[in-house]
Image (cartoon, rainbow, N blue to C red):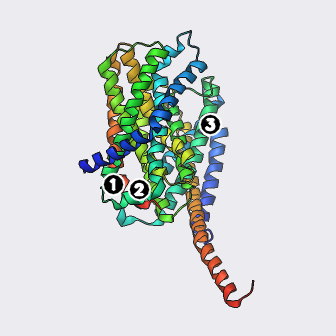
Amino acid sequence: MSSGIGTRVLGVAAVASLAVLAVMALVITPADVNQLDAVRLIYIHVPMATVMYVAFGVTALGSILYLLPRTRARKWDLLAGAAAEIGVVFTGLVLVSGSIWGRTTWGVWWTWDARLTTTAVLFVLFLGYLALRRVGGDVDARAKRNSIAALAACIDLPIVHKSVEWWRTLHQKSSLLDEQTFLHPHIHGSMYWTVMLGIGAFLLLFAWLLINRYRLAKLEDRMEDEGLERAIAERRAEALTGSP
Amino acid sequence: MLRDAVVMAGKDLRIELRSRVATNQVAPFALLVLILFAFALDPDRGVLARAAAGLFWVAVLFCALLAIQRAFAVEATDGARDNLRLSGLDPAAIFLGKASAIAAELAVLEVILGAGVVILYNRSLHGPVLLVVTCVLATAGLAAAGTLYGALAAGLRVRETLLPLLLLPVVAPVLLAATRASEAALGGSPGDGWPWVRLLGVFAVIYIAFGVVAFGPLLEESS
């Protein structure tokens, strides 16, 4: 079960588009009038946030498909887990890149802005989910537990978002980081396209990571099953031949 | 189904009344938390009184964790969980019963903590209607989400450490909304509190509904 030709092409495409992105982001696009070179963080920050949402979307979808009796299959749980792992990594990267960006433009590493706070809660929610996934037990029981936990976390997100949004808007104006800034009419043409390219490149990267992580999860699964069977067979053989 | 739920809640509450773990351990712990906050925050400068609503709800969350651990520890011994599955009670009713029992325990703890806040933090109570509604809805939400995650973590070797990690981020909106609503009530501007109360209501309804649906599969899987 080695990596297929399609996956390899996908990997090459991801690396190539990331290389183009690096050139576009660091050389071709202009610096911002106010933010200077710090604005270039947008080319990775926004794509990583997109990957984060897509990844957790895949986790939710995989969990639903596992829980529905008609589509129940072990692979959906493995897919959900693979996507969640990548999602958590990218959530961490989003928080770090956002923090660095915040430091250079707002002067602070962290503000209790609605979006930042929601992302932080999201990060912790899915760290908990990954911790739960690592707990052993019967395979089906584990998968069911994982799926329910993922959905319970996902239905929490809109509530977290709403509450945090109210919390902040009752105290201060909405932050710099809302959609208006990204889709603002005066965003420079090449900057806009570079952000779009970034999203595409990171989605390719996500797809490549997801396929490989999923394959790894399947192999781990198989090793668990076959490892036990093999051990039993070996013991039987020993008993039959009478050797120690 | 409702009758089953009442049976279940009655059973859990009877255990708590007889074992006295809630009264002898959880309630003193709640008061201890209030005293610890006073050590951490300077009581002379009014920090405690201003933060009273938030501290109250943080203390409630800690106690809720203990109550939930306890509610499922009771089922862990003597094969009680298998008996529960064999009892023929509707899983949804088991969920509702356990959640109601936890909610009842939390309600008692909230009264104790409330008295503690009034006496120790020197904070007078205003807006009783808003306060009571906030407490009822927040408790319902905490108990529902707590029962769901309690069942999820029950029977795992790492449940003591896993439950807080799973539950606390999920109930973060409850902490936030309940604190804001209580602050509005105490600050004498109840109008600001009602949107938060609605949010608490939505949270409670969503997690009760989710628990009712998900509890069946969760009980089955225990092994």
The residue at the point 62 percent across, 37 percent down is A96
Q: Amino acid at mark 1?
A: Pro
Position of B143 relative to A212 (above/below): above
Q: Amino acid at mark 2?
A: Leu
Pointer 2 residue:
B218
SS type, badge 2: helix
Q: Nearer the viewer, mark 2 or mark 1?
A: 1
Which label sits on residue B204?
none
Place of residue B72 in the rendered image (x, y in percent of width and height, measured from the top left)? 45, 48
Tell me if residue B40 can be seen: yes
Tell me if residue A57 can be seen: no
Position of A209 relative to A45 (above/below): below
Look at the numbered discs 2 and 1 and tell me whether their residues touch, using CB distance below 8 Å.
Answer: yes
Place of residue B76 in the rendered image (x, y in percent of width and height, measured from the top left)? 47, 53
SS type, badge 3: helix
Q: Nearer the viewer, mark 3 or mark 1?
A: 1
Distance, label 3 to label 1, CA atoms, is 45 Å
Which label sits on residue A97?
3
Label 1 marks which chain's residue?
Answer: B
Callout 1 crowding tier (Cα within 10 Å): few <14, some 14–19, many ≥20: many
Q: Nearer the viewer, mark 2 or mark 3?
A: 2
Pointer 1 residue:
B91
Question: Which image quarter: residue B202?
Answer: top left
Label 3 marks which chain's residue?
Answer: A
Question: Which image quarter: residue A5?
Answer: bottom right
Place of residue A226 in the rendered image (x, y in percent of width and height, measured from the top left)? 60, 75
Q: Amino acid at mark 3?
A: Ser
The residue at the point 58 percent across, 55 percent down is A134
Position of A27 relative to B87 (above/below): above
